[in-house]
Image (cartoon, rainbow, N blue to C red):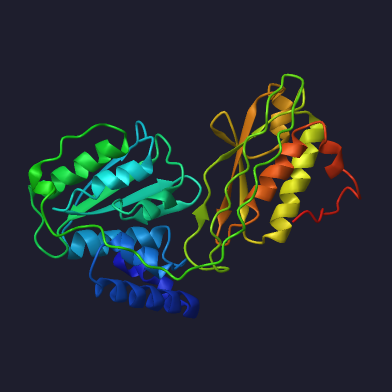
Amino acid sequence: MTPENNLEVLSTRTGFNNAVRHIQKTMGIASEKGNLGDILYKMEDEELSGGRTGMLLRMYLIDKLGYKTASTNLVSVAADMSKLAQEFQKWKGVDLVAAYHHPELGLLVANPKIAEELAGFGEMRKRELLAVYAGLQGKEADENCQKAAELALSAFEGAKVNVPSALTKGNFAAAKISKPKKETEAKPKKTAAVKGKAGAKAAPAAKAAPAPKAGSGPVKMTPRYAVVVQNELFHNGNVEAWKRIVASYKAKNTGLDVYIYYEGERILDINSLFKWGKVKHGSAIEFAVAGHEIQDVAKLQRYLAQGASHQFEAFLRGPVNSVLKLF
């Protein structure tokens, strides 16, 4: 593509205005001091996502600050992200920024020394792309920065790494991140167990996720929550119940998406769970919610658990094309 073609976006008013806003935001970020993950986390700007974030990483960290970088498609994933953040906090000799290409949410950026930011990556998965940037915030990066980026990748994959003393001594300690307090959903009680013939119990209720103000910040995703099938088979009635529950949830919580997983794979069509004929009593189907204002997760899990049991018929009442008012 020629340079002239790269400027075609500026030929329309909308494209020109979008470009100007992006440049203004980029220049504003470039004037900030500190970790880029921290800066983006405090900004909560939904427009700085995906490709725009990728351009920012290149312009700010590599072109301007000269950070070293290493990337990999994850072979494995560390079991505990909070412990990983505690480990990275010891790396005071270098500044770290992690960029994870989430399969549903796109490019996510965090300071891996801050557990709260790292939690924003959700459940990291094998074979997805992760890049780590390491530098000295304005000072010329050295071979220790490249080593730090490579070791950080290994740590993300769950390997035990030997950290050189040069990476543990310095001024790049994790800073406390302060954000305006936001209303949270009331902590739900544990879901009452629904016993099947085999005595399996429904998974505990999902913990309520903090609810940011509507439409603000980058899209977030909850962890996956398990729903144990209580029926002898997850049959067509259970499928229809789940479809109506999800439709009701999305109608009440506009802008939120519900992702369904079975045996680690995302299910694009809930009907396929019935067609496979292998989702039987005691099997676990997982779900996660993504969006800006995540709420009613515990209630959603409670209804899905009921919909996966012999009590599914409660969700099949009313006109076929009607939306239930469950939330």
**Residue 57 falls left or right of residue 139:** right
Residue 77 higher or lower than 165, as above or below: above
Residue 229 visible to the viewer: yes
Q: Which quarter of the rendering shows the C terminus?
A: bottom right
**Residue 287 falls left or right of residue 110:** right
How many labels, in total?
0
Q: Nearer the viewer, residue 213 or 26?
A: 213
In the displayed orientation, state which residue is furthest to the top: 198
Residue drawn at point x = 47 percent, y = 77 percent:
12
Q: Nearer the viewer, residue 8 or 60?
A: 60
**Residue 230 falls left or right of residue 15:** right
Q: Which quarter of the rendering shows the N terminus?
A: bottom left
> Could you tell me residue 314's position as x and y percent?
86, 42
Residue 126, by quadrant, is top left
Residue 93 higher or lower than 33, as above or below: above
> Could you tell me residue 288's position as x and y percent?
58, 45
Residue 115 higher or lower than 158, as above or below: below
> Could you tell me residue 217's position as x and y percent?
47, 65
Residue drawn at point x = 31 percent, y = 33 percent:
158
> Could you tell me residue 14's position as x and y percent?
49, 77
Residue 311, by quadrant, is top right
Residue drawn at point x = 37 percent, y = 43 percent:
81
**Residue 318 falls left or right of residue 310:** right
Residue 1 visible to the viewer: no
